[in-house]
Amino acid sequence: MRLHNAVLFLFLSLWHHISAQETGRVSYYSHKLIGKKMTNGDKYNACDFVAAHRNYPLGTLLKVTNLDNGKFVVVKVTDRGPFSHTRVIDISYAAAEKIGMISSGHANVKVEEANELQFLLTPETMLTEQTPKLKLACEIPFNIKLFP
């Protein structure tokens, strides 16, 4: 009976983690943070596909879907935040551009842990050191409007 209860407890714990998803508001990092250290020790680069999340472990891949247009991006959790309780996640400029939210500065999104297939389908999530073309393709306009 103990083994049965232990297995059931383990299954329920993992099921919650596997099926976990949340919806809410997203914004993107300010350009004032470029070059600043994130929680994982890396410096923020606006052309990387990274995010700040309060709960997911650092290094976790998350699929962020814009609920208004259906566009999604896979980002890597490299930082903690957002520190505003009105948002569930903050993403990099490149990720925000990919899901079409640059002009508004925020969007309603669904956040869920990305599985391996989703990661393979979105090659832009590879680290920029592995795909140097991305650094050249990512252009940040100088006259952008900053959002808090």
Image (spheres, rainbow, N blue to C red):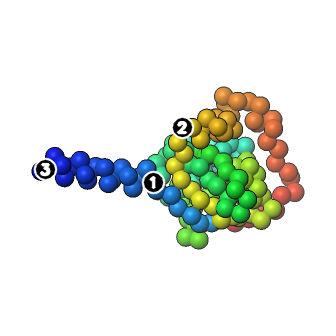
- Residue found 67% across the figure and 30% down from its top: 129
Apparent side of residue 116 relative to residue 30 in the rendered image (left or right): left
Q: Is residue 26 visible?
A: no
In the picture provided, is 146 more to the left or to the right than 39?
A: right
Residue furthest left as drawn = 1
Cβ atoms under marks 1 and 2 closer than 8 Å: no
User: Which type of secondary structure does the marked residue at label 1 adopt?
Assistant: helix
Considering only order in the chain, which callout, 2 or 1, is on the residue closer to the N terminus? 1
Sooner in the amino-acid sequence: mark 3 or mark 1:
3
**Depth check: 44 or 134 in front?**
134
The first of marks 3 and 2 along the sequence is 3
Residue type at numbered disc 1: Ser
Residue under pointer 3: 2
Q: Quadrant of residue 65?
A: bottom right
Q: Which mark is residue 19?
A: 1
Q: Quadrant of the C terminus?
A: bottom right
State the residue in front, 27 or 122.
122
Relative image position of residue 10 (x, y in whole percent): 28, 49
Residue 117: x %, y % from top left: 57, 38
Amino acid type shown at disc 2: Glu
The residue that appears at 68% across and 42% down in the rendered structure is 48
| Spatial separation of the CA atoms under disc 3 and disc 2 | 34 Å
C-alpha span from label 3 to label 1: 26 Å
Coordinates of residue 75 in the picture (x, y in percent) = 61, 46
Q: Which mark is residue 39?
A: none
Say which residue appears at 41% left-offset and 52% top-offset: 17
Q: Name the disc covering residue 116, or none.
A: 2
Q: Residues within 10 Å of mark 2 (few under 14, many from 20)?
A: few
Q: Residues within 10 Å of mark 3 (few under 14, many from 20)?
A: few
Q: Position of residue 59 (x, y in %)?
A: 51, 42
